Image (tube, rainbow, N blue to C red):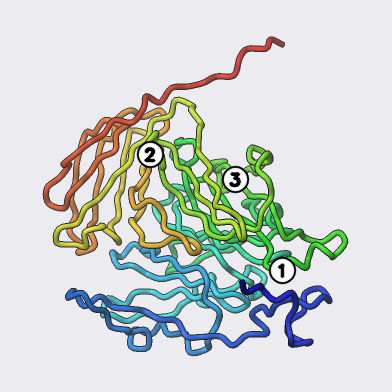
Amino acid sequence: MNKLPTFGSDEKNCRFKGILVQCGPWGMQGESDLLFHNRGDGTFEEVSKKAGVDDPEHHYGLGVEWGDYDNDGWPDLYVANDAGPNYLYRNKHDGTFEELGMLSGVALSGDGLEQGSMGVDWGDYRHEGRMGMFVTNFVEQGNTLYRNLGDQGLFSDVSWPSKLAQPSFPLVGWGTSFFDMDNDTWLDIFVANGHVYPQVDSIPGGARYKQSMLLFRNNRDGTFEDVSTVLSAIPAASRRGAAFGDINNDGNVDIVIVNVGEPPSLLLNQGSNGNHRVLFKLIGMKSNKSGIGARVTVMTATSTQFNEVRGGGSYLSQNDPRLHFGLGADSKISQIEIRWPNGKIETLRELPADFIYTIVEEQGITNKTALPPPLRRDLPDTGD
């Protein structure tokens, strides 16, 4: 069996904090990015150069995420580069893209530094009707949250005021996602962590190779609370990919995690706080069958939310293609709007919560499966 090298051969570029390690980005040659256009006949055409997304600088692309950040109905592309500026490709509606990472404010940290970026996700974490970007980074850099200002495509680095940066500072972040862990309509954040160099365990007082996970609850005011202690009983590991979805169809989002050199982990979300929720499975007919690229907007008496069906997610992962929405105390959806990838919009009204709905393009709801009742389990009264 082939073993990973315990040290690099390049004395200059394969060191970390003074010790020899397998080469990181500074000791390797980069490669261009590739984009494959589906011809619709079972074949693909590689169009990265023609589309303007080939990365002629040959950075080390890791996290990739499509998302319509400017709400113009066309999917845009974010690419996280390890040890280089990140890319934001705005869709020009003609098969080409314009790279706006530097101009928009999402290429570097707020203080202008290149970071070792890995995991990425789009999400409307403030209920502002536009998606922000969350990026996980290398040790001693802190993870980055970019707020979408909605003003000419500009973003602001709010990692520190949002209280997300400091807990991640000693960790190496990988798989991540915005997700509503408690079905209160507000997007929370999970991060899988793990160092890349086993040799770091020999550095006194430094970051460890096996690391804990991070979980943040949305405070509904642009800040997050670190609630990672609920995961403290799970042994540390060097983790990479993280996929999110309702594994057991109980209305809660679960997480599957890839661990280096160990079996994967399954985190079942067993919270039960009485909040309502809903899932939508989209099937395209004129659009692609999986509905990838479709946007669903859900309106209730107290909130408006949206999300998009995506292929792939965060880092080396594929999330549940069904879209999950927490609904809080609202037991009824007043309206849902589906914008299919071909631009056509369908509207459905007055739907009860707590179901998994299958919606077929131009046919409406073809199936619905009831979720378990959203029961509340209160802690016992222990007195004063």
Give how far apart the Cα atoms at labels 1 and 3 are: 26 Å
Q: Position of residue 374 (x, y in %)?
A: 40, 26
- Residue 303 badge: 2
Q: Give coordinates of residue 202: x percent, y percent.
A: 84, 64
Q: Quadrant of the N terminus?
A: bottom right
Q: Earlier in the sequence, mark 1 or mark 2?
A: 1
For the point 19% across and 56% down, the residue is: 284
**Do the numbered discs 1 and 3 sit on residues whose CB atoms are within 8 Å?**
no
Regarding residue 181, the answer to whether it shows in the image is yes
Outermost residue to the right: 204
Q: x%, y% of residue 70? A: 37, 65
Q: Left or right? Give the position of 250 relative to 177.
A: left
Q: Is residue 232 above or below residue 114?
A: above
Which amino acid, by three-letter code, is at mark 1?
Tyr
Specify the label residue 251 is tagged with: none
Secondary structure under tag 3 reads: strand
Work out which quarter of the rendered image holds the C terminus and state it. top right
- Crowd rating for badge 2 (residues with CA inside 10 Å; few <14, some 14–19, many 20+): some
Q: Given this view, does label 1 or label 3 mark the residue nearer the observer?
A: 1
Under mark 2, the amino acid is Ser
Relative to 290, residue 47 above or below: below
Depth check: give the residue in front, 24 or 72.
24
Q: Toward the viewer: 301 or 26?
A: 26
Name the residue beneath numbered marker 3: 216
N-terminal label among 2 and 3: 3
> Which residue in the structure is indicated by mark 1?
197
Q: Which numbered mark, 1 or 2, is in the foreground of this view?
A: 1
